[in-house]
């Protein structure tokens, strides 16, 4: 009964209060009850209830200025191992996934045809070496012949010239006749022979008288007669010789001497004409030298042919040019390979992986070598790989993008060429920066903008200067400090000076 009385008194009080308010309102004709009591009138934001908004407390944090890029992984060492010449593939020693090393034989061609070519080239070399030796022998022979011909013709010319000179002198003597001394000598010879004859005649007469007187023997007379006859003969010979000396040479002797001179002239001309053979022999020597040069060139060409054939034979052993992993096996033993389709294996070195990132032309000028890059490969969600910009290509593609080559550390050899990846090129890192949500910024123009800051439950407008933007986070360089409470949602429902309340349970969140 007591509880009902209390409830009744509350209802009665409420009714009485309503009557008072109604009566008062009637007296003021719609005026403010507070005004009738002398209280100040409530207007503007004070009259509005608080608006629910999202509020975040500003805190100092680290923010990075990045360029977001995409691209594919590649490798510096991605090679095709193929044949240099057509032929049958004899063996393939590696399969996909096999690890191979530099210089390792990974496949082999049938060597039969190349071995035959090598044998042919070696036979050709032997033939050319033989021709070279023959050319050298021909040169030596021609040099000997030249020397012999030169000596013989030179001697013949000297002898012919000497014989001509003798013939000329003899002809001159014949034509000139005896000299005065010879004539004088002939006269003296006649006188001496006459004196000997006269003495022999006198002795003969005396011995004849003695013989008639039997004073000497017949033998002594015969001896005297013989001496007298000899003296007479010498006298007659001296007379004839003197007569010939005085008469001079006969016409026949002159003609004979002139003929001897002409014959000597012809012999000299013949010897001199034979000297032309020396020039011919010199030509033989030069021709032999040219033959040696030709033979030497042929030997060099044949040696080159042998080397090429030997190299072609060695090339039938296909070797890996790098350390790597077999990515693809493109031919099998027994298949015919050729220059048109030479590839046998694809080998990739996964240790030298790099990321070719495509960069928009608007951000090209911000790139530089050495900038750190965080790369995420789509095939390995959650795994991030660190790298650095190693090269920026200066020519844009047809899509108006530039390529930045990023070198990666392929730890565990997990990365493979042609994997698709994305990355963040870190241009700048700011520690202890004042960072807010992008949603907090209103009317952003360049590096300027506005935010609402909550103080004592009221929205206060601030102009801010902006810095690095990374995704939905943006740095405030001027206008805010740590601990400020900024409105991050609901700004469109309020004006500066409005009362606001945090829509989050338990107060404002913190960045």
Image (tube, rainbow, N blue to C red):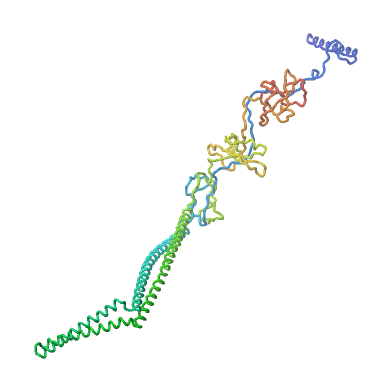
**Relative to 459, is 233 above or below?**
below
Farthest top residue? 2
> Residue 223 or 438: which is nearer the viewer?
223
117 left or right of 477 in image: left
> Residue 235 or 250: which is nearer the viewer?
235
**Relative to 326, is 303 above or below?**
below
Q: Quadrant of the C terminus?
A: top right
Identity of the residue drawn at 73% across and 26% down: 450
Q: Position of residue 4 (x, y in %)?
A: 80, 11
451 left or right of 195 in image: right
**Total tally of numbered discs in the picture:** 0
**Relative to 124, is 258 above or below?**
below
375 left or right of 250 in image: right
Identity of the residue drawn at 54% across and 37% down: 409
Q: Work out whether residue 80 can be spotted.
A: yes
Q: Position of residue 14 (x, y in %)?
A: 83, 12
Hey, which quadrant is residue 394 in on the image? top right
Q: Work out whether residue 115 can be spotted.
A: no
Farthest bottom residue? 212
Hey, which quadrant is residue 130 in on the image? bottom left
Q: Position of residue 266 (x, y in %)?
A: 39, 75
> Residue 436 or 30: which is nearer the viewer?
436
52 left or right of 245 in image: right
Q: Position of residue 355 (x, y in %)?
A: 59, 39
Q: Quadrant of the N terminus?
A: top right
Hey, which quadrant is residue 268 in on the image? bottom left
């Amino acid at each position: 009964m007591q509880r009902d009385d209390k409830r009744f008194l509350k209802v009665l009080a409420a009714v009485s209060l309503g009557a008072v308010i109604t009566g008062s309102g009637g007296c003021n004709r719609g005026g403010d009850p507070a005004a009738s009591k002398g209280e100040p009138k409530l207007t503007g934001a004070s009259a509005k209830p608080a608006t629910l908004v999202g509020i975040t407390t500003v805190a100092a944090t680290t923010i990075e200025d990045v360029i977001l890029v995409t691209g594919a992984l590649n490798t510096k060492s991605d090679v095709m191992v193929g044949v240099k010449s057509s032929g049958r593939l004899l063996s393939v020693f590696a399969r996909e996934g096999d690890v191979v090393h530099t210089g390792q034989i990974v496949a082999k061609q049938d060597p039969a045809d190349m071995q035959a070519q090598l044998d042919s080239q070696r036979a050709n070399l032997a033939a050319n070496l033989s021709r070279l030796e023959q050319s050298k022998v021909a040169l030596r022979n021609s040099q000997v012949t030249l020397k012999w011909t030169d000596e013989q013709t030179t001697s013949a010319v000297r002898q012919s010239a000497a014989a001509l000179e003798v013939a000329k002198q003899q002809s001159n003597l014949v034509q000139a006749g005896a000299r005065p001394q010879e004539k004088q000598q002939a006269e003296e010879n006649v006188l001496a022979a006459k004196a000997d004859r006269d003495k022999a005649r006198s002795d003969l007469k005396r011995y004849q008288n003695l013989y008639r007187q039997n004073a000497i023997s017949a033998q002594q007379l015969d001896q005297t007669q013989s001496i007298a006859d000899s003296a007479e003969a010498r006298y007659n010979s001296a007379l004839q010789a003197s007569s010939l000396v005085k008469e001079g040479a006969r016409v026949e002797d002159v003609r004979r001497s002139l003929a001897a001179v002409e014959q000597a002239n012809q012999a000299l001309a013949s010897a001199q004409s034979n000297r032309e053979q020396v020039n011919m022999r010199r030509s033989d020597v030069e021709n032999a030298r040219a033959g040696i040069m030709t033979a030497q060139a042929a030997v060099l060409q044949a040696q080159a042919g042998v080397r090429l054939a030997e190299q072609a034979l060695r090339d039938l052993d296909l070797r890996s040019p790098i350390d790597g992993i077999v990515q693809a096996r493109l031919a099998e033993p027994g298949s015919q390979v050729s220059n048109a389709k030479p590839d046998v294996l694809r080998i990739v070195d996964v240790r030298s992986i790099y990321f070719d990132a495509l960069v928009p032309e608007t951000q090209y000028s911000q790139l530089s070598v050495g900038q750190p890059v965080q790369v995420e490969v789509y095939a390995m969600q959650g795994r991030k790989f660190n790298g650095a910009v190693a090269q920026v290509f200066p020519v844009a593609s047809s899509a108006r993008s530039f390529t930045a080559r990023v070198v990666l550390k392929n730890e565990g050899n997990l990365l493979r060429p042609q994997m698709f990846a994305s990355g963040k090129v870190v241009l700048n890192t700011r520690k202890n920066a004042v960072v807010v949500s992008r949603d907090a910024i209103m009317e952003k123009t360049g590096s300027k903008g506005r935010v609402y800051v909550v103080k004592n439950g009221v929205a206060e407008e601030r102009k801010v200067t902006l810095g690095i933007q990374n995704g939905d986070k943006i740095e405030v360089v001027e206008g805010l400090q740590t601990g400020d409470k900024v409105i991050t949602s609901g700004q469109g429902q309020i004006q500066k000076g409005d009362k606001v309340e945090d829509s989050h349970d338990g107060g404002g969140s913190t960045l």
